[in-house]
Amino acid sequence: MPKTGTDFFERVYQVAELIPHGRVTSYGAIANYIGSYRGARMVGWAMNKCSSWNKYIPAHRVVNSKSLLTGKHHFPGGETMKELLENEGVIVEGNQIMNFSEVFWNPSEELL
């Protein structure tokens, strides 16, 4: 669990930094893990702002619960998020991850 006492965005980034190469998680899965059960939208805002964080955050690995690349418009160019995921072996068609159940990383299960 991310350090308590840190701000919401920092807790989100601490989890997002741990998403393994070739895996994805959802905004809601991160929110649930940090104890903000209805905070998926705020996790999305955090991902939108992560370029100002002092470390690299693999924001391309965070998608919505339906496996859609809803944050892709926050990356430079129209296909950057998709390309980054495909380079890691994630299968993406259009704006949707096709092998979502195979690559989904649930921090509540993985970070015990």
Image (cartoon, rainbow, N blue to C red):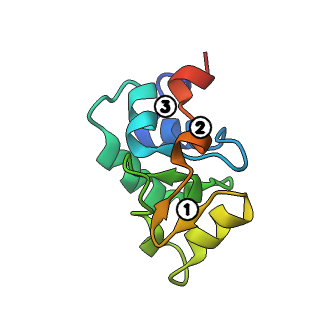
Foreground pick, 109 / 36: 109
Point 59% across, 75% down: residue: 80
Q: Nearer the viewer, mark 2 or mark 1?
A: 2
- Quadrant position of the N terminus in the picture: top right
Q: Label 3: how many residues lie within 10 Å, few (<14), some (14-19) or many (20+)?
A: few
Distance between the Cα atoms at labels 2 and 1?
14 Å
Point 45% across, 26% down: residue: 33
> Horizontal and vertical percent for residue 98?
52, 56
- Quadrant position of the C terminus in the picture: top right
Query: Looking at the picture, does residue 5 appear above or below residue 30?
Result: above
Residue on which disc 3 sits: 6
Quarter of the rendering containing residue 90: bottom right
Seen from this angle, which residue lies furthest top?
112
Q: Is residue 44 left or right of residue 39?
A: right
Q: Nearer the viewer, mark 2 or mark 3?
A: 2
Cβ–Cβ under 8 Å for marks 2 and 3: yes
Point 47% across, 55% down: residue: 47
* Disc on the earlier residue, 3 or 1: 3
Quarter of the rendering containing residue 7: top left
Residue 43 visible in the displayed image = yes
Foreground pick, 56 / 61: 61
Amino acid type for the residue under numbered disc 1: Ser
Q: Label 2: how many residues lie within 10 Å, few (<14), some (14-19) or many (20+)?
A: some
Residue on which disc 2 sits: 14
Residue on which disc 1 sits: 52
